[in-house]
Image: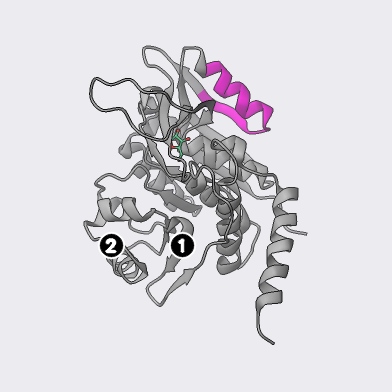
Protein backbone atom coordinates (compact mmCIF):
# COMPACT_ATOMS: atom_id res chain seq x y z
CA UNK A 1 0.00 0.00 0.00
CA UNK A 2 1.44 3.37 -1.04
CA UNK A 3 2.34 5.74 1.79
CA UNK A 4 0.15 8.81 2.29
CA UNK A 5 2.30 11.72 1.09
CA UNK A 6 2.45 15.16 2.58
CA UNK A 7 2.40 18.01 0.07
CA UNK A 8 2.91 21.69 0.90
CA UNK A 9 1.80 24.41 -1.50
CA UNK A 10 3.15 27.93 -1.12
CA UNK A 11 1.03 29.85 -3.58
CA UNK A 12 -2.02 31.68 -4.74
CA UNK A 13 -5.73 31.44 -4.06
CA UNK A 14 -8.18 33.19 -6.38
CA UNK A 15 -11.87 33.32 -7.10
CA UNK A 16 -12.56 32.33 -10.71
CA UNK A 17 -15.26 34.21 -12.62
CA UNK A 18 -15.69 32.18 -15.77
CA UNK A 19 -17.69 33.33 -18.79
CA UNK A 20 -18.37 30.91 -21.63
CA UNK A 21 -18.48 32.85 -24.85
CA UNK A 22 -18.55 32.37 -28.61
CA UNK A 23 -16.80 35.66 -29.36
CA UNK A 24 -15.20 38.68 -27.68
CA UNK A 25 -16.53 42.27 -27.62
CA UNK A 26 -14.89 44.96 -29.77
CA UNK A 27 -13.87 48.18 -27.94
CA UNK A 28 -17.08 49.96 -26.80
CA UNK A 29 -19.27 46.99 -27.68
CA UNK A 30 -21.46 44.89 -25.32
CA UNK A 31 -22.25 41.32 -26.28
CA UNK A 32 -23.96 38.39 -24.55
CA UNK A 33 -21.97 35.54 -23.03
CA UNK A 34 -23.56 32.09 -23.01
CA UNK A 35 -22.97 30.90 -19.44
CA UNK A 36 -21.24 31.93 -16.20
CA UNK A 37 -19.54 29.95 -13.45
CA UNK A 38 -18.16 31.14 -10.10
CA UNK A 39 -15.62 28.90 -8.37
CA UNK A 40 -12.57 28.59 -6.15
CA UNK A 41 -9.36 28.80 -8.15
CA UNK A 42 -5.82 30.16 -8.19
CA UNK A 43 -2.98 28.02 -9.43
CA UNK A 44 -1.65 27.31 -5.92
CA UNK A 45 -5.05 26.46 -4.45
CA UNK A 46 -5.94 24.31 -7.47
CA UNK A 47 -2.74 22.31 -7.13
CA UNK A 48 -3.38 21.87 -3.40
CA UNK A 49 -6.91 20.63 -4.08
CA UNK A 50 -5.74 18.21 -6.79
CA UNK A 51 -3.13 16.81 -4.38
CA UNK A 52 -5.74 16.46 -1.64
CA UNK A 53 -8.23 14.70 -3.92
CA UNK A 54 -5.49 12.31 -4.97
CA UNK A 55 -5.11 11.32 -1.32
CA UNK A 56 -2.30 13.48 0.12
CA UNK A 57 -2.22 15.37 3.38
CA UNK A 58 -1.93 18.96 2.19
CA UNK A 59 -0.82 22.16 3.85
CA UNK A 60 -1.48 25.48 2.10
CA UNK A 61 0.44 28.72 2.66
CA UNK A 62 -1.41 31.68 1.11
CA UNK A 63 -2.93 35.10 1.62
CA UNK A 64 -6.52 36.22 0.94
CA UNK A 65 -8.34 39.52 1.33
CA UNK A 66 -10.58 40.72 4.15
CA UNK A 67 -13.57 40.66 1.78
CA UNK A 68 -16.42 38.30 0.85
CA UNK A 69 -14.05 35.87 -0.87
CA UNK A 70 -11.35 35.56 1.83
CA UNK A 71 -13.28 33.62 4.51
CA UNK A 72 -15.05 31.54 1.84
CA UNK A 73 -11.67 30.49 0.42
CA UNK A 74 -10.36 29.50 3.87
CA UNK A 75 -13.58 27.58 4.52
CA UNK A 76 -13.22 25.76 1.20
CA UNK A 77 -9.72 24.56 2.14
CA UNK A 78 -10.96 23.36 5.52
CA UNK A 79 -13.96 21.60 4.02
CA UNK A 80 -11.63 19.67 1.73
CA UNK A 81 -9.39 18.68 4.63
CA UNK A 82 -6.51 20.96 3.64
CA UNK A 83 -4.53 22.45 6.53
CA UNK A 84 -5.29 26.19 6.23
CA UNK A 85 -3.47 27.32 9.41
CA UNK A 86 -1.12 29.35 7.21
CA UNK A 87 -3.80 30.89 4.99
CA UNK A 88 -4.29 34.37 6.44
CA UNK A 89 -6.44 37.39 5.59
CA UNK A 90 -4.64 40.67 4.90
CA UNK A 91 -5.94 44.25 5.12
CA UNK A 92 -6.11 46.70 2.26
CA UNK A 93 -6.00 44.24 -0.64
CA UNK A 94 -8.78 42.36 -2.40
CA UNK A 95 -8.67 38.60 -2.61
CA UNK A 96 -7.09 37.38 -5.83
CA UNK A 97 -9.61 37.10 -8.67
CA UNK A 98 -9.47 35.65 -12.17
CA UNK A 99 -11.91 36.68 -14.89
CA UNK A 100 -11.73 33.73 -17.31
CA UNK A 101 -13.18 33.41 -20.82
CA UNK A 102 -13.76 29.99 -22.36
CA UNK A 103 -14.43 29.45 -26.08
CA UNK A 104 -16.67 26.64 -27.40
CA UNK A 105 -13.53 24.56 -28.14
CA UNK A 106 -12.68 24.56 -24.41
CA UNK A 107 -9.72 26.92 -24.94
CA UNK A 108 -9.42 29.59 -22.23
CA UNK A 109 -8.05 33.12 -21.73
CA UNK A 110 -7.33 34.21 -18.16
CA UNK A 111 -6.74 37.55 -16.43
CA UNK A 112 -5.38 37.36 -12.90
CA UNK A 113 -5.66 40.24 -10.43
CA UNK A 114 -3.24 39.10 -7.75
CA UNK A 115 -4.58 41.22 -4.86
CA UNK A 116 -3.70 39.61 -1.52
CA UNK A 117 -1.48 37.00 -3.20
CA UNK A 118 1.08 39.82 -3.53
CA UNK A 119 1.28 39.98 0.27
CA UNK A 120 2.80 36.50 0.66
CA UNK A 121 6.37 37.27 1.71
CA UNK A 122 9.54 35.27 2.46
CA UNK A 123 8.87 35.82 6.19
CA UNK A 124 5.61 33.89 5.74
CA UNK A 125 7.61 30.91 4.50
CA UNK A 126 9.64 31.07 7.71
CA UNK A 127 6.47 31.40 9.78
CA UNK A 128 5.22 28.15 8.24
CA UNK A 129 8.62 26.44 8.43
CA UNK A 130 7.56 23.70 10.84
CA UNK A 131 4.72 22.59 8.55
CA UNK A 132 6.90 22.93 5.45
CA UNK A 133 9.79 20.93 6.89
CA UNK A 134 7.54 17.89 7.34
CA UNK A 135 6.47 17.90 3.67
CA UNK A 136 7.60 15.33 1.08
CA UNK A 137 7.30 17.99 -1.58
CA UNK A 138 6.91 21.77 -1.79
CA UNK A 139 4.94 23.02 -4.80
CA UNK A 140 5.27 26.61 -6.08
CA UNK A 141 3.87 28.81 -8.85
CA UNK A 142 4.29 32.40 -10.04
CA UNK A 143 1.11 34.13 -8.78
CA UNK A 144 2.90 35.30 -5.62
CA UNK A 145 5.97 37.61 -5.44
CA UNK A 146 8.93 35.99 -7.18
CA UNK A 147 11.18 36.78 -4.19
CA UNK A 148 8.93 34.54 -2.10
CA UNK A 149 9.17 31.80 -4.72
CA UNK A 150 12.98 32.05 -4.80
CA UNK A 151 13.09 32.03 -1.01
CA UNK A 152 10.89 28.92 -0.84
CA UNK A 153 13.13 27.15 -3.38
CA UNK A 154 16.11 27.95 -1.15
CA UNK A 155 14.16 26.68 1.88
CA UNK A 156 13.38 23.38 0.12
CA UNK A 157 16.99 22.98 -0.99
CA UNK A 158 18.32 23.71 2.52
CA UNK A 159 16.01 21.12 4.10
CA UNK A 160 16.39 18.50 1.36
CA UNK A 161 12.72 18.63 0.38
CA UNK A 162 11.68 17.86 -3.21
CA UNK A 163 10.52 21.05 -4.93
CA UNK A 164 8.29 21.44 -8.00
CA UNK A 165 7.98 24.86 -9.62
CA UNK A 166 5.22 25.68 -12.07
CA UNK A 167 6.29 29.06 -13.54
CA UNK A 168 2.76 30.22 -14.28
CA UNK A 169 1.86 32.80 -15.39
CA UNK A 170 5.05 33.00 -17.43
CA UNK A 171 7.35 35.93 -16.65
CA UNK A 172 11.08 36.66 -16.83
CA UNK A 173 12.99 34.80 -14.09
CA UNK A 174 16.35 34.89 -12.33
CA UNK A 175 17.69 31.56 -13.61
CA UNK A 176 20.37 31.47 -10.89
CA UNK A 177 17.64 31.30 -8.25
CA UNK A 178 16.24 28.16 -9.89
CA UNK A 179 19.49 26.18 -9.90
CA UNK A 180 19.14 22.90 -8.03
CA UNK A 181 15.35 22.83 -8.52
CA UNK A 182 14.03 19.25 -8.78
CA UNK A 183 11.24 19.88 -11.29
CA UNK A 184 10.47 22.89 -13.45
CA UNK A 185 7.06 22.46 -15.13
CA UNK A 186 6.04 25.22 -17.60
CA UNK A 187 3.49 24.90 -20.38
CA UNK A 188 4.47 25.85 -23.95
CA UNK A 189 3.81 29.58 -23.63
CA UNK A 190 5.50 29.84 -20.23
CA UNK A 191 8.55 28.00 -21.56
CA UNK A 192 8.65 30.43 -24.51
CA UNK A 193 8.37 33.50 -22.28
CA UNK A 194 11.13 32.33 -19.99
CA UNK A 195 13.65 31.13 -22.59
CA UNK A 196 12.72 33.33 -25.54
CA UNK A 197 12.67 30.15 -27.69
CA UNK A 198 9.61 28.97 -29.67
CA UNK A 199 7.80 25.81 -28.52
CA UNK A 200 5.65 24.97 -31.55
CA UNK A 201 6.42 21.24 -31.69
CA UNK A 202 8.15 18.45 -29.79
CA UNK A 203 11.56 19.14 -31.36
CA UNK A 204 11.38 22.78 -30.28
CA UNK A 205 10.20 21.76 -26.82
CA UNK A 206 13.31 19.59 -26.51
CA UNK A 207 15.57 22.52 -27.44
CA UNK A 208 13.80 24.74 -24.97
CA UNK A 209 14.12 22.14 -22.19
CA UNK A 210 17.85 21.85 -22.97
CA UNK A 211 18.25 25.59 -22.43
CA UNK A 212 16.47 25.35 -19.06
CA UNK A 213 18.52 22.35 -17.95
CA UNK A 214 21.71 24.25 -18.78
CA UNK A 215 20.72 26.66 -16.00
CA UNK A 216 21.11 23.92 -13.37
CA UNK A 217 17.52 22.66 -13.06
CA UNK A 218 17.52 18.88 -12.57
CA UNK A 219 14.39 17.95 -14.54
CA UNK A 220 12.16 19.87 -16.93
CA UNK A 221 8.62 18.84 -17.83
CA UNK A 222 6.95 20.93 -20.54
CA UNK A 223 3.21 20.35 -20.57
CA UNK A 224 1.81 20.38 -24.11
CA UNK A 225 -1.98 20.48 -23.63
CA UNK A 226 -3.69 17.90 -25.84
CA UNK A 227 -0.23 16.60 -26.84
CA UNK A 228 0.69 15.41 -23.36
CA UNK A 229 4.08 16.39 -21.96
CA UNK A 230 7.81 16.25 -22.52
CA UNK A 231 10.15 15.03 -19.77
CA UNK A 232 13.74 16.17 -20.17
CA UNK A 233 16.86 15.54 -18.13
CA UNK A 234 20.53 16.05 -18.97
CA UNK A 235 20.60 12.46 -20.23
CA UNK A 236 17.41 12.11 -22.28
CA UNK A 237 14.10 13.61 -23.37
CA UNK A 238 10.87 11.69 -23.80
CA UNK A 239 7.47 12.70 -25.12
CA UNK A 240 4.52 11.18 -23.24
CA UNK A 241 1.29 11.52 -25.24
CA UNK A 242 -1.99 12.62 -23.67
CA UNK A 243 -5.12 10.53 -23.18
CA UNK A 244 -7.93 11.43 -25.60
CA UNK A 245 -11.04 12.85 -23.88
CA UNK A 246 -13.95 15.11 -24.81
CA UNK A 247 -12.65 18.46 -23.53
CA UNK A 248 -15.12 21.19 -22.65
CA UNK A 249 -12.98 23.47 -20.44
CA UNK A 250 -9.20 23.19 -20.17
CA UNK A 251 -8.90 25.72 -17.33
CA UNK A 252 -6.86 24.30 -14.46
CA UNK A 253 -5.66 21.24 -16.38
CA UNK A 254 -2.04 22.23 -15.74
CA UNK A 255 -2.81 22.54 -12.02
CA UNK A 256 -4.48 19.12 -12.00
CA UNK A 257 -1.33 17.74 -13.67
CA UNK A 258 1.05 19.24 -11.12
CA UNK A 259 -0.96 18.51 -7.96
CA UNK A 260 -1.51 14.88 -8.96
CA UNK A 261 2.09 14.41 -10.19
CA UNK A 262 3.43 15.61 -6.82
CA UNK A 263 1.32 12.97 -5.06
CA UNK A 264 2.09 10.06 -7.40
CA UNK A 265 5.81 10.82 -7.14
CA UNK A 266 5.72 11.17 -3.35
CA UNK A 267 3.96 7.80 -3.14
CA UNK A 268 7.11 6.34 -4.62
CA UNK A 269 5.93 5.65 -8.16
CA UNK A 270 8.58 5.67 -10.90
CA UNK A 271 8.70 9.11 -12.51
CA UNK A 272 7.40 7.92 -15.89
CA UNK A 273 4.38 6.18 -14.32
CA UNK A 274 3.67 9.26 -12.21
CA UNK A 275 3.74 11.38 -15.36
CA UNK A 276 1.43 9.08 -17.34
CA UNK A 277 -1.05 9.15 -14.50
CA UNK A 278 -0.79 12.94 -14.16
CA UNK A 279 -1.47 13.16 -17.92
CA UNK A 280 -4.72 11.25 -17.41
CA UNK A 281 -5.70 13.17 -14.26
CA UNK A 282 -5.24 16.45 -16.18
CA UNK A 283 -7.17 15.18 -19.21
CA UNK A 284 -10.10 14.12 -17.02
CA UNK A 285 -10.24 17.61 -15.50
CA UNK A 286 -10.95 19.10 -18.94
CA UNK A 287 -14.18 17.10 -19.23
CA UNK A 288 -15.82 19.25 -16.52
CA UNK A 289 -16.42 22.98 -16.11
CA UNK A 290 -14.22 25.13 -13.83
CA UNK A 291 -10.98 24.31 -12.07
CA UNK A 292 -11.19 22.68 -8.62
CA UNK A 293 -14.72 21.45 -9.21
CA UNK A 294 -13.60 19.60 -12.34
CA UNK A 295 -10.95 17.56 -10.46
CA UNK A 296 -11.87 13.98 -9.62
CA UNK A 297 -11.11 12.05 -6.45
CA UNK A 298 -8.74 9.10 -6.25
CA UNK A 299 -11.45 6.47 -6.54
CA UNK A 300 -12.80 7.91 -9.78
CA UNK A 301 -9.27 8.42 -11.05
CA UNK A 302 -8.25 4.81 -10.38
CA UNK A 303 -11.36 3.56 -12.21
CA UNK A 304 -10.51 5.76 -15.22
CA UNK A 305 -6.86 4.65 -15.07
CA UNK A 306 -7.86 0.98 -15.09
CA UNK A 307 -10.21 1.57 -18.04
CA UNK A 308 -7.56 3.48 -20.02
CA UNK A 309 -4.91 0.86 -19.32
CA UNK A 310 -7.27 -1.80 -20.72
CA UNK A 311 -7.82 0.26 -23.88
CA UNK A 312 -4.06 0.73 -24.35
CA UNK A 313 -3.40 -2.98 -23.67
CA UNK A 314 -6.14 -4.04 -26.10
CA UNK A 315 -4.70 -1.84 -28.85
CA UNK A 316 -1.08 -2.99 -28.34
CA UNK A 317 -0.11 -5.60 -31.01
CA UNK A 318 0.99 -8.95 -29.48
O1 LIG B 1 -4.64 27.63 -13.85
C1 LIG B 1 -5.95 28.07 -13.73
C2 LIG B 1 -6.00 29.17 -12.71
O2 LIG B 1 -5.30 30.28 -13.20
C3 LIG B 1 -7.38 29.68 -12.41
O3 LIG B 1 -7.98 28.99 -11.33
C4 LIG B 1 -7.15 31.15 -12.13
O4 LIG B 1 -7.45 31.54 -10.84
C5 LIG B 1 -5.69 31.41 -12.47
O5 LIG B 1 -4.92 31.41 -11.35
Left or right position of 166 against 292 = left
Q: Which residues are magenta?
A: 70-87
Up the image or down, 56 lies above or below 37; here it is below
Left or right position of 121 against 27 = right
Does residue 78 show up magenta in the picture? yes
Tell which quarter ligand 1 is in. Answer: top left
Residue 211 lies in quadrant: bottom left
Up the image or down, 256 lies above or below 148; here it is below
Quadrant showing the N terminus: bottom right
Find disc 2 in the rendering and name its residue: 215
Residue 146 lies in quadrant: top left
Quadrant showing the C terminus: bottom right
Front-lying residue, 68 or 125: 68
Left or right position of 55 against 174 = right
Color style of the picture = one colour
Front-lying residue, 113 or 125: 113
Check if mark 1's residue and mark 2's residue have beta carbons within 8 Å. Answer: no
Amino acid sequence: MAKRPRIAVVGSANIDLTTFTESFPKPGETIFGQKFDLGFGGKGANQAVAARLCGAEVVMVARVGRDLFGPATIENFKKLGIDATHVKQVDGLSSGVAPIFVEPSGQNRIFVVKGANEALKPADVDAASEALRSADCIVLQFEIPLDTVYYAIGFARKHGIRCILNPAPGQPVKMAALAGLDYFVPNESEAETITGLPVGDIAQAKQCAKRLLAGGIHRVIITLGANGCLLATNDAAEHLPAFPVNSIDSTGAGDAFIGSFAVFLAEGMPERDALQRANLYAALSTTGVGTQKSFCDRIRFEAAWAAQSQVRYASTPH
